[in-house]
Image: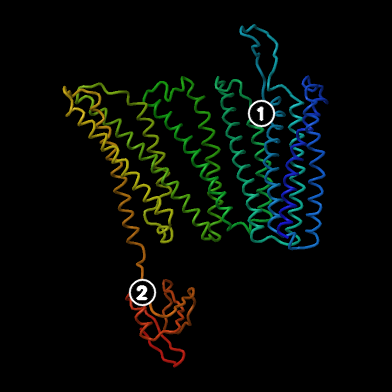
Amino acid sequence: MILRRLYLYLVSAAGLGLLAAGLALLGSTVLLFVFNDPSAQDSRTQLAIYTAMTVVALPVWGAHFFFARRFAMRDPAERASAIRRLYLYLACLATSIGALIAIAFTASTLLRPLMDTCGTVATGPVFVKNTPEVTCPANPDWLATSQAGWIALVFIAIWAFHFRIAARDRATVGETGASATLRRWYMYVALLIGLLVMLNGASGFIELAWLKAWRSTLGDYRYLGNPAGIFVGGLVVWGFHWLTIARHHVSDDRHSTLRALTGFIAVGVSMITALVAASQILYFALARALGVAHPGGVGDDILGALAAPGSGAVVYGIAWFVIRFQLAKDARAQEADRQAGIRRLYTNLAALVSLGAWAIGAGGLLWTLAEQLEAPIIGLKAGDWKDPLSLWVTLLIVGAAVWIAHWRPSPWAADRQSLSRRLYVWAALLGSVLVVLGAGVGMLNALLQQVFSAHPRLNDPGNLDFGHYLAVIVIAAGVGLYHWRVLRADAAARPPKVVAEQAPAAVAVAAPAAAPFHATDVADPNTRRYVLSVTDATEDDVHQALANLPPQASYKLTATEHGAVDEH
């Protein structure tokens, strides 16, 4: 049965891929003849190849999928098999991504004539005024639009066919276990790709609209229709899958690992992009406030240079806030263990990255200040401090803000003892020690260069490295000392391990269970009761095995054979 399924669906997948490529390329080539394109006569060889691909692939795919469907209609187990769902959802994922690209290109070619205009284009080495335009991407190109639209129709038709079959299978035989996991892999991967493409298109559109409104030269030969088309393609794919999940699958998927993983990947991308954009804005602002004429070498058009980071901060900042709110809503309902693990991984990873950012900013800030203080003392002229100071202060402020937002010195016990937190603390400690080691070598080298020199002199520019590396050591040592204290505090908060001597009996410990409640019991929410079943052991063996319980713990030993009760 399994080998038959593998054969049928593997051949169906191969035939479907060849059929999709053949149909898309064949239709695009035929459109060359429909529009009387000059390259049509040179495309007859390609026309034969694409026709052969389509004619061969169609019966191969159709026959094998017909028999696969016939077996599935007869046997519910066949219809609910993971191999069948793998084929269906893989086809849906591949065609949805292909449709996204084709829709984006189609929308771009349709929107460019509506949103953009072209100036005169030079056609030779010498620009002649009033030379007619030869090519302009803003002009209507119905051939390219038709070709992209045809490819989009092919992918949408194949996707709709397989999506409808998968929906009917779910309605008939249900979907649990591996089948539900495969459906989530398809839907959440498509959802994530559509979301990221949509955000990229929105950011690019706002940036270019900013440049066009400001009449900046940075917007020359760039067209609003391109990012608008990308936005439309991403919106279609993301919007459909988001609505489908919200209407039919949200109750099943709310606590799934893939849903949480997709959300945290989207949050991570949005967070990093928004923070980088905010850092650029803050850097430009500080540099200009300090009198730097060309911060980062961007020239005089500062407002034009702010278009990209400004649009990124707006679009990805909003996405960061919205997706984090959705993840928090899912966690409030009920957070499964794997979801909690992904949340902790994201939180500690964000803390580690932001720690590196503000530590580099603090180190660079002290590096610059140390040079400004040391240079006059040893008789040297200090270098420019305004531009690097703006950069280091930006890293310090943005990194510290994100680190404070994510780092908790004393979180809940489960978060405090998690593997991701331990990895963060040890990585921070290891990094700080390695930085101190390298900076210590650099500082000592700067000192020994003069000690071993035949003609030592105080105003040697190499002597500035002593202050440079000293500043780095101060920051790295501070980071390392803090995280060493965090490591010790986490270790002290860890509950002690109870090491009991191995008894010569088999002991079975059940999960925490509710014990009978008596009127004399105290309803303490921090108290846990356990049911312990011991066989083939004497009372002395059991007392010896439980001798290392903490002083506040108590247990009651009941011998079922003799009815004896012994309380401790």
Residue type, mark 1 in image: Gly
The structure residue drawn at horizontal position 70% and vertical position 47%, both measured from the top left corner, is: 92
From the viewer's perspective, is residue 366 above or below residue 259? above
Q: Is residue 255 left or right of residue 447?
A: right
SS assignment at label 1 = helix
Label 1 neighbourhood size at 10 Å, few (<14), some (14-19), many (20+)?
many
> Quadrant location of residue 103?
top right
Label 2 neighbourhood size at 10 Å, few (<14), some (14-19), many (20+)?
few
Residue pointed to by mark 2: 500
From the viewer's perspective, is residue 106 above or below residue 553? above
Residue 145: give x, y in percent of width and height.
74, 29
What label does residue 50 carry, if any?
Answer: none
The disc, 2 or 1, on the residue closer to the chain's N-terminal end is 1
Residue 234: give x, y in percent of width and height.
65, 39
Q: Nearer the viewer, mark 2 or mark 1?
A: 2
Contact flag, marks 2 and 1 (Cβ < 8 Å): no
Q: Is residue 87 left or right of residue 402?
A: right
The structure residue drawn at horizontal position 62% and vertical position 8%, both measured from the top left corner, is: 127
Residue 477: give x, y in percent of width and height.
28, 44
From the viewer's perspective, is residue 421 above or below residue 519? above
Residue type, mark 2 in image: Ala
Residue pointed to by mark 1: 225
Task: Tell me how far mark 2 sits from mark 1, CA to CA.
Answer: 72 Å
